[in-house]
Amino acid sequence: MDTIQSLFNGVAVGSIIALAAVGLTLTMGILRLSNFAHGDFLTMGAYLTWLINSNGVNIWLSIVVSTLGTVILMLICEQLLWKPMRDKRASSTTLIIISIGLALFLRNGILFIWGGSNQNYDLPLVEAIDIGGVKIAYYRIIVVTLTIAAIVALHLILKNTKIGKAMRAVADNIDLARVSGINVEQVVLFTWIMTAMLTAFGGGLFGLITTVRPNMGWFLILPMFAAVILGGIGNPYGAIAGGLIIGIAQELSVPIFGSEYKLGVALVIMIGILLIRPQGIFGK
């Protein structure tokens, strides 16, 4: 029973990692950017949700509004940071250093504005659901369900819309996409919008199953990168599978190694994949 409980907890946490990892793999695959501030945008989504919800707004509306707020914040960063760096053809090392600086700026901004105390959403208490003798928290079921809905929506956008096909073309070959008449800048903006929506939505959902704290996204950045590498850089479906695998592996390791080594499990999986199959399970 404990194993089944840990398995479902892993699916819930893996769902959050998967949502954020999809956004991360889109920026890596399309924008060629390893964004170390990605986890802190997830934190921002959770804090904005908490801020709105604590003022008496329904939790679901709070998540929607916080997602829009995070989209605006990411687009501001695109105009002030990433677009000028692309125009200057900045190296990948420069972009990584800038993203680390942005991560520190966001995290310390959260600490400055809201302090370092843990926060919780204003949610009604709901009894855990008994499934075959296993007690599963109601909000964990909600997280998994909404993640599935978001993944289905993402699939439909990537496969059936013009902008989705343009995104895949830019990811495959940006120069060929440009000479083919694709508006690359439009694709870049839409990539940031999708990234922000998935990441903020993941942050809002994460707050349903854990406390909201300034470093919550920072502790997820390693599992996110592990999920992206495991699934294959630039492959959204690989990132989803990788996120679920990392989440489940971390939770199943707790009874054996303890909760303090969960990040170590993600690191070991990432190193193992890099050594055995650098292109990831599903390929780039």
Image (cartoon, rainbow, N blue to C red):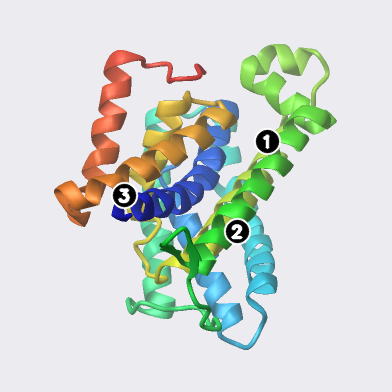
User: Which residue is at 66% across, 18% downward?
Assistant: 174
Name the amino acid type tagged 3.
Answer: Thr
Residue at the disc numbered 3: 3
- Mark 3 touches mark 2? (CB < 8 Å): no
The image quarter in which residue 118 lies? bottom left
Q: CA distance from mark 1 to mark 2?
A: 15 Å
Indicate which disc residue 78 carries.
none
Picture quarter with the N terminus: bottom left
Q: Mark 1 = which residue?
A: 188
For mark 3, give the secondary structure: helix
| Pointer 1 or 2: first along the chain | 2
Q: Considering only order in the chain, which callout, 2 or 3, is on the residue closer to the N terminus?
A: 3
Query: On screen, 204 above or below 172?
Result: below
Give left or right: position of 231 versus 80. Answer: left
Q: Position of residue 27 (x, y in %)?
A: 55, 35
How packed mark 1 is, by other alpha carbons closer than 10 Å (few <14, some 14-19, many 20 or more), is some
Which residue is outermost to the bottom?
A: 56
> Residue 260, how many percent across, how many down?
19, 55
Q: Quadrant of residue 106?
A: bottom left
Taking the spot 29% from the left edge, 39% from the top edge, the residue there is 266
Mark 2 residue crowding within 10 angstroms, few (<14) / some (14–19) / many (20+): some
Say what amino acid the circle numbered 2 marks: Leu
The image shows residue 248 at horizontal and vertical percentages of 37, 43
- Which residue appears at 51% of the width and 46% of the height? 20
Q: Which residue is mark 2?
A: 73
Mark 3 and 1 residues: CB-CB less than 8 Å, in contact?
A: no
